[in-house]
Image: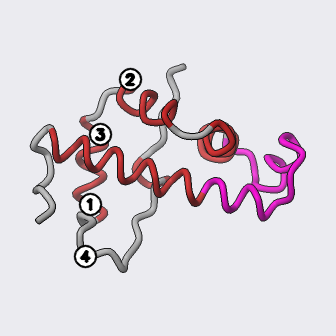
Amino acid sequence: MGNTLDAGELPLADDDPHEPPPGEIADVLERFSDQQVIDALQELPQDQRLALLLVDVEQLGQEDAAAVLEVPVGTIKSRTSRGRATLRKRLAQHARDMGFLGRKT
C-alpha cells in the first residue's frame, strides 16, 4: 500500500492550544515514513479506518463511501472526523517522541 494521507487531509482543530500550527504539522508529516502512517491507520478501529481509506485515500465522496459501506452519510462524516482526530493525536505524539515537535507541558 503506497498511498498515504497528505498533511492537508488532516485538518487541525483551531481551538486546541496544544496542537502545533498547521505548517509545522505539514513539515513533520512529510518526514514520516509511509510505514509510520500505515501503522497509525492500522491502530484505528476498523470502521474508522475503512471510512478514512475510502474518503481520504481513494478519494470517494462521502455519499459514495456511505453506499460502499452501506451506512448513512452522517456515519461516514462521524467516522472520518473521529479517525482524523485520532490520527492527528497519534502522529503528533510520534513527532514529539522523535523530537520534531515540542513536548506538551
Q: Residue at x 29, y 40 (%)?
A: 30
Q: Which of pointers 3 and 1 lies earlier in the amino acid sequence?
A: 1
Of the two numbered discs 4 and 3 in the rendering, the one whose residue sits closer to the viewer: 4
Q: Which residue is drawn at 76% across and 59% down?
A: 75
Residue receiving disc 3? 30
The residue indicated by pointer 2 is: 35
Badge 3 marks a residue whose secondary structure is helix
- Which type of secondary structure does the marked residue at label 4 adopt? loop
Q: Which segment is the magenta one?
A: 59-80
Q: Position of residue 82 (x, y in %)?
A: 56, 57
C-alpha span from label 4 to label 2: 28 Å
Question: Mark 3 vs mark 2: which is more N-terminal?
Answer: 3
The residue singled out by tag 1 in the image is 23
Q: How far is the residue under mark 3 from the one under mark 2? A: 12 Å
- Give the x, y percent position of residue 104: 15, 61
Residue type (three-letter) at the residue carrying disc 3 = Glu
In primary-sequence order, the first of circles 4 and 1 is 4
Q: Residues within 10 Å of mark 4 (few under 14, many from 20)?
A: few
**Relative vertical location of residue 20 with respect to residue 79 in this rendering, above or below:** below
Q: Residue 17 carries which label?
A: 4
Q: Distance between the residues labelled 4 and 1?
A: 15 Å
